[in-house]
Amino acid sequence: MKISKNQAVREDWDEVKSWNYKLKSLPQKYQSVVYAELKGDHSEVDTYDTERIYYIIDGEGEFKINGQTTPVTQGDVITIPPKSKYDYKPKGKKTLKVIVFMDLWDN
């Protein structure tokens, strides 16, 4: 299966740009692959029954997961456990670019 960028669902808010590549036909738990560029705070979100996996493509930033802050940089992978509250943001003025593998984000 191939999904082109022009088939992805675009969703932007505040200083976040994102493209949601939906994989609805897959039976696995990771049905959305999302590319995002952050110039500011993402804002707090909750995970449900599936962990989320982030790969840091470019930039530096920090993730705050259940109150604990973890720094990240290009090439890092960070996982968000199920049933967690988290937020993330770039460090300084540089854009943080990430890919996240997650449950279906049906935006």
Image: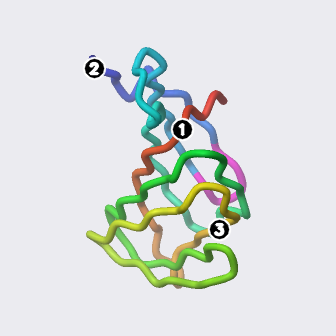
SS for tag 1?
loop
Question: Residue at 66% of width from left, 47% of height from top?
Answer: 48
- The circle drawn on residue 103 is 1
Upstream in sequence: badge 2 or badge 3 = 2
For marks 1 and 2, the one nearer the N-term is 2
The image quarter in which residue 66 lies: bottom right
- In the image, what residue occupies the spot 40% across and 21% down? 26
Which amino acid is tagged 2?
Lys
Residue sitting at x 58%, y 72%: 89
Check disc 2: other Cα within 10 Å, few if <14, some if 14-19, many if 20+. Answer: few
Q: CA distance from mark 2 to mark 3?
A: 30 Å
Residue highlighted by disc 2: 2
Q: Distance from label 1 to label 3 (Cα)?
A: 17 Å
Q: Residues within 10 Å of mark 1 (few under 14, many from 20)?
A: many
The figure's colour scheme reads rainbow
Q: Which residues are magenta?
A: 12-16
Query: Does the segment drawn in magenta span residue 14?
Result: yes
- Judging depth in this view, the residue of 22 and 27 nearest the camera is 27
In the drawing, what numbered circle is on residue 87?
A: 3
User: From what the image shows, is residue 105 above or below residue 68?
Assistant: above
> Is 92 part of what is drawn in magenta?
no
Dominant secondary-structure state across the stretch colored magenta: strand
SS for callout 2: loop
Identify which amino acid the numbered label 1 is placed on: Asp
Residue situated in front as seen by the camera: 46 or 95: 46
For this view, does 33 lie left or right of residue 18? left
